[in-house]
Image (cartoon, rainbow, N blue to C red):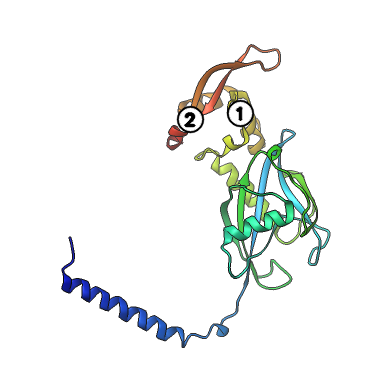
Amino acid sequence: MEQTEEQSESTNSALKRVQETAEAKAHTYDASKYERPSVTVDVVMMSLRKRDLQVLLIKRRSWPYEGMWAIPGGFVNIDESLETAAKRELQEETGVQDVYLEQLYTFGDPGRDPRTRVITVVYFALLDSERLQVRAADDAADVGWFSVYDLPSLAFDHEKILHYSLERLRGKLDYTTIAFSLLPEQFTLRELQRVYEIILHKRLDKRNFRKKILSTGILEDTGAKKMEGTHRPARLYRFNPEAEAKL
């Protein structure tokens, strides 16, 4: 229903009063009365390498935890968004750019950082490591891939963060298409099952897995086939984005 001219003037007047009240209160607000925790971002990047689920870590160059391995990350500048900070820190420490990041969780235990009260927002990416040019950039002494099942001693609470990230990743297998980001455009059911087994860290029944995944309708048979060892040629499938909602 359209507003009358009188109603429109009344609405504008009310908005003006709200704005004037907000501006008046802004002059009386004293931010120094409240303690200010620092905010950081950490970026968990996982990939399948050598039939293993691995995570990208950097070796810290400075205190605290100098010389220890850690998740790439750092402090958020006052004038940047969380996502911008995550991408900047990732590039500064590993040289990695143009990666889609998903915000995962926030960790804020009071004693998690010996420098000060620090709250960190964790971002996550699951991708093909072969597409990345990884190098130790200015803010890191070294960079490398490590098995999530055989991690070195980690700085801060990063072992806890990685454990949580792995559990979230496993949960996402049931209701998202995240596993397909680790596969080529066309793949066999055996290759898809291997991705699930590596992430879940257990063997899956071949018949049950294929029945379940094919019942979702999320795969398209390309009509092509591929030789896998000495077995008969296996059908090649591709992800059907239009059927994603069926998960």
* The quadrant where residue 184 appears: top right
Outermost residue, front side: 5
N-term-proximal mark, 1 vs 2: 1
Q: Is residue 208 above or below residue 27?
A: above
Q: What secondary structure is marked by label 1?
A: helix
Q: Residue 93 location in percent, x, y? A: 73, 56
Q: Nearer the viewer, residue 165 or 102?
A: 102
Q: Which residue matches tag 2?
A: 240
Q: Amino acid at mark 2?
A: Asn
Residue at image location 69% in from the left, 54% down from the top: 91
| Image disc number at residue 22 | none
Q: Is residue 235 above or below residue 123?
A: above
Q: Amino acid at mark 1?
A: Gln
Residue at image location 48% in from the left, 85% down from the top: 29
In the visual, does 191 lie left or right of 146?
left
Visible residue check, residue 143? yes
In the visual, does 163 lie left or right of 242?
right
* The quadrant where residue 139 appears: bottom right
Q: The N terminus lies in which quarter of the figure?
A: bottom left
Are there few (<14), some (14-19), or many (20+) residues within 10 Å of tag 2?
few
* The quadrant where residue 59 appears: bottom right
Q: Which residue matches tag 1?
A: 193
For marks 1 and 2, give the CA distance.
17 Å
Q: Residue 43 location in percent, x, y? A: 65, 54
Residue at image location 49% in from the left, 24% down from the top: 220
Q: What secondary structure is marked by label 2?
A: loop
Are there few (<14), some (14-19), or many (20+) residues within 10 Å of tag 1?
some
Of the two numbered discs 1 and 2 in the rendering, the one whose residue sits closer to the viewer: 2
Q: Residue 51 location in percent, x, y? A: 72, 33
